[in-house]
Image: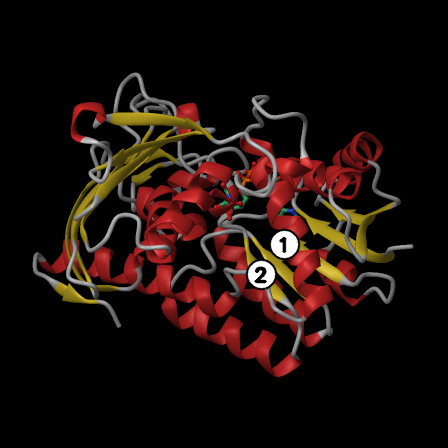
Amino acid sequence: MSKPLNIGLIGCGFMGRAHSNAYNQVSHFFDLAYRPVLKAVCARNAESAQAFAARWGYETVETDWKKLITRKDIDAVDICVPNNLHHEIAIAAAKAGKMVLCEKPLSMNTAQGREMITAVEEAKVPNMVWYNYRRVPAVTMAKHLVDEGKLGRIFHYRAVFLQDWTISADLPQGGTALWRLDASAAGSGVTGDLLAHCIDTALWINGGIDSVSAMTETFIKERKSNLTGKVEKVGIDDACAFLARFNNGSLATFESTRYARGHKALYTFEINGEKGSLKWDLHDLHRLQMFDHNDESRLRGWKSIHVTDHGGEHPYMDKWWVPGLQIGYEHSFTHQVADFLQGLETGKPAGPTFRDALETQQVCDAVLASAQEGRWMKVQ
Ligand SMILES: NC(=O)c1ccc[n+]([C@@H]2O[C@H](COP(=O)([O-])OP(=O)(O)OC[C@H]3O[C@@H](n4cnc5c(N)ncnc54)[C@H](O)[C@@H]3O)[C@@H](O)[C@H]2O)c1
């Protein structure tokens, strides 16, 4: 019989839904010592909280996160609110002795991130940051193949994350729906929002980044603020591109924008090594493209691996349907919950922990500083 793990969720938006779905699914598909129990959800508006609780199965609601984190019947606090709230809530939750699962990016900057690490490590509470793309089976497999040396020495890493939803100059900034355009709530624009995902995956697969050289642009300089009603300066980066040198000697390019007309969420990466290359595309997320130079020369070419097989060969897939049937975006969150719960059982924490995720924060800070100063920056 599994043990209950009482979840207190803060924030009922996109991620609040994605995580609630994962908590509801995980025990149906994974055999684990712990099972999440949807104990309480917090939204500032009581009616919204009630409606969310009824839809997803939360037992109770709160309208103040400070009340939720001190409740005796909560074991783990899940932070699904805008970036500027992560620091305060995570530290308070850790001090209250709760496990903390925090959405990405860990914090607004490296200094905040360090304080969050101190809090969870002093309190000795399990912690994790939701860089969920690591748990897309094809991405996990890319990591395994690189670790096994299938690509040999890595020369290049190339990642992009493209969207097009902020092109209109009439779009306001700030408030509940558009906090991502408000620097005081988001910290940065595409760097912390989208590139942070690309950086996390890259650090995980290809190791640490030594230095970066970046450029950013804010195409629409002023937007009406939903908070003040006035036209105000835009403080976020609309687009960011940077060069990076990895510690293993490989060279990389990263690009992200919300101005690539036609692209909604195109996250792709490609890795080129001495013996082969790998390519992955979020729009075709169950496939991993591979070129293996060791193949017989007349048969050499890019192959498309449908990462849906069982027997433990394709990560996570033995937990789902039958070989050949694919899964999707939401399953990456279910896998992350499963790994977190397994970490509680084995004592080997699932990554990225707060400490792991700080590295992404350090790269983001170096990228923004490089763009501002117009020079190469060492990552701290
Ligand atoms: N892992 C991923 O792929 C991924 C994807 C999207 C967002 N995120 C991250 O998740 C976090 C939330 O993003 P989102 O897309 O869910 O945003 P969202 O705007 O959809 O939801 C945020 C929710 O937080 C609520 N909120 C704000 N202040 C609050 C407070 N003081 N108390 C309680 N609730 C409050 C809002 O009302 C809203 O319901 C951000 O840090 C974001 O970067 C991660």
Query: Of marks 2 and 1, which one's residue comes earlier in the chain?
Result: 1
Q: Secondary structure at mark 1?
A: helix
Q: Work out whether 166 lies above or below 351.
A: above
Residue 119, percent from left and from top: 58, 77
Tally of numbered discs:
2
Q: Amino acid at mark 2?
A: Ala
| Residue 153 visible, this angle | yes
Q: Nearer the viewer, residue 279 or 231?
A: 279
* Residue at screen point 54% across, 59% down: 86
Q: Residue furthest bottom?
A: 122
Q: Position of residue 352 (x, y in %)?
A: 50, 60
Please state if 285 lies on the left or on the right of 233 as rendered.
Answer: right
The quarter of the image that holds ligand 1 is top right
Residue drawn at (60%, 35%), measured in percent from left and top?
A: 310
- Residue ID for mark 2: 350
Q: Quadrant of the N terminus?
A: bottom right
Residue at 34% from the left image edge and 57% from the top image edge: 203
User: Who is closer to the viewer here, 216 or 201?
Assistant: 201
Label pair 2/1, CB-CB below 8 angstroms: yes
Residue 360, quarter of the rendered image: bottom left
**Is 30 left, or right, of 238 in this rendering?**
right
